[in-house]
Image (cartoon, rainbow, N blue to C red):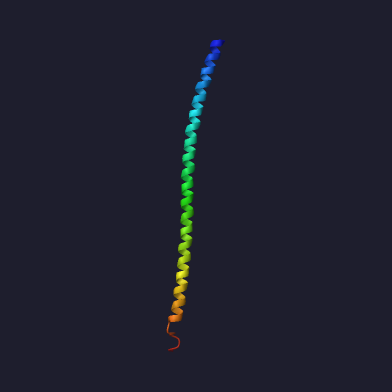
Amino acid sequence: MLKRGNELTEELKERSSKFSHAVAERSGEVSHQVAKRSRQAQKNIADQDRSFWIALGFGFGLTAASIVTFFLDPSPLATC
């Protein structure tokens, strides 16, 4: 009975060690995936923000060019 108890103890230690190793590996994989997804999310946010400012700048530039053209145009309707 003592021998069987020692065998069970050794088996339990071995299983515990394997389990700890598996948990550590899985934890590393999960950490890597979380970091990868975090970087991707940051990149997506930056791309969206950049697109907004590009569209806004284009809109303001087009409006300013239209206003300047309207005021500097020698009015082709007056020559008719």
Q: Quadrant of the C terminus?
A: bottom left
Q: Position of residue 6 (x, y in %)?
A: 53, 14
Q: Position of residue 20 (x, y in %)?
A: 50, 28
Which residue sits at x=48%, y=39%? 31
The number of callouts visible is 0
Which residue sits at x=46%, y=60%? 51
Which residue sits at x=45%, y=88%? 78
Residue 28, placed above or below residue 54 = above
Which residue sits at x=47%, y=41%? 33
Q: Nearer the viewer, residue 47 or 77?
A: 47
Residue 79, placed above or below residue 14 = below
For this orientation, the residue located farthest to the right is 1
Residue 73, placed above or below residue 44 = below
Q: Position of residue 7 (x, y in %)?
A: 52, 15
User: Quarter-wise, where is residue 75 in the image?
Assistant: bottom left
Q: Quadrant of the N terminus?
A: top right
Q: Position of residue 14 (x, y in %)?
A: 50, 22
Residue 69, placed above or below residue 46 = below
